[in-house]
Image (spheres, grey):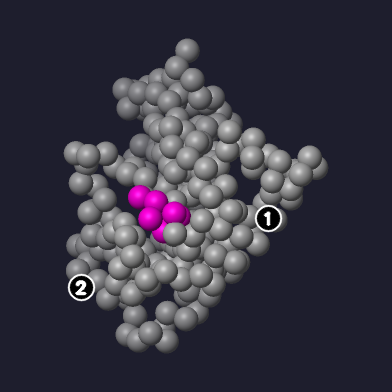
Amino acid sequence: MYVHLLATHNGKETTPNSLMESTKKLFEEAANITVPLDAKVPEAIDVQLGQTTVARKLKGLILTNLYAPTTMGKIPEILHATFKGEWTRIMEEPQTDIWGPWNLGRHSMFAISCGDSPFRVESVDDLYSIVQASLAENSFADYSAMRRLACTRWPFKASEILDANKILNVKTSKPILFTNTRYDPVTPLVGAYTSASRFRGSGFLLHDGVGHGVMNHPSKCIIQTIRKYFDDGTLPPTGTICKPGLE
């Protein structure tokens, strides 16, 4: 139902490009609408900011529902409600639980990402260029950057902090297998290719699926190829692409 409504949002001549342009305008409009966080808004990282914009909440809903095919069907409904100006409904929409009821992984994000990163600042002014750089290259940065800002004054650091600038042309004792989905909303494919290029003799396995990580969109090919790698170190042929599906 909601997919059909979006498909005809701009009339019979609606195209993916015209719908994208309408969505961009929607984000711009929603960015100027703020709702106090004491008004039935589900718990979010924005709580300490005092108030959040509808645009930031909307992007958070879209991003979390892109994590897996099982939740992507919620996105047309969310966008349709936003196009109708149902701002309160969007603000009160609960964030999709991508972890599950018995997984406390959500609480480890800051400890891992902030502990591993040398990113710290001494003043608010230090953040300006960092935030502007993120906004210039990522239309969802106003949502994702807020989470990264928690690291600016994180009091702990990992015993070994990764310096990506030093990882170039590395030769390992055994070749590394890298893998990524083509349409990962969190870890872009270009990042995986870049990482693989830093390690000599590494292999790359492309999952032609959606969602975050290679297991959210099950693939028999992915499972068998990764298992083979861990069993005896066999890398797939260069250019291997695995399709979704368990048959």
Q: Which mark is residue 155?
A: 2
Vertically, is 81 above or below 150?
above
Residue found at x 20% / y 46%: 104
Query: x, y (%) of residue 216?
Result: 40, 33
Q: Relative to residue 165, is residue 227 drawn left or right? A: left
The magenta stretch spans which residues? 89-94
Residue found at x 60% / y 36%: 3
Task: Inspect the image, locate mark 1, and give the three-letter code of the amino acid beneath it.
Answer: Ser
Query: x, y (%) of residue 27?
Result: 58, 62
Task: Inspect the image, locate mark 2, and give the three-letter code of the amino acid beneath it.
Answer: Pro
Distance between mark 2 and mark 1 Cα atoms: 42 Å
Q: Relative to residue 109, is residue 229 drawn left or right? A: right
Vertically, is 49 above or below 42?
below
Q: Quadrant of the N terminus?
A: top right
Quarter-of-image position of residue 228: top left
Q: Nearer the viewer, residue 108 or 61?
A: 61
Tag 2–tag 1 contact (CB < 8 Å) = no
Element class at badge 1: helix
Residue found at x 67% / y 51%: 20
Q: Residues within 10 Å of mark 1 (few under 14, many from 20)?
A: some
Q: Nearer the viewer, residue 201 or 42?
A: 42
Query: x, y (%) of residue 26?
Result: 61, 60
Residue found at x 51% / y 24%: 244
Vertically, is 244 above or below 41?
above
Q: Nearer the viewer, residue 225 or 45?
A: 45
Q: Which mark is residue 22?
A: 1
Labels 2 and 1: the sequence-earlier one: 1
Asked if the magenta segment contains residue 54, the reply would be: no
The nearer-to-camera label among 2 and 1 is: 1
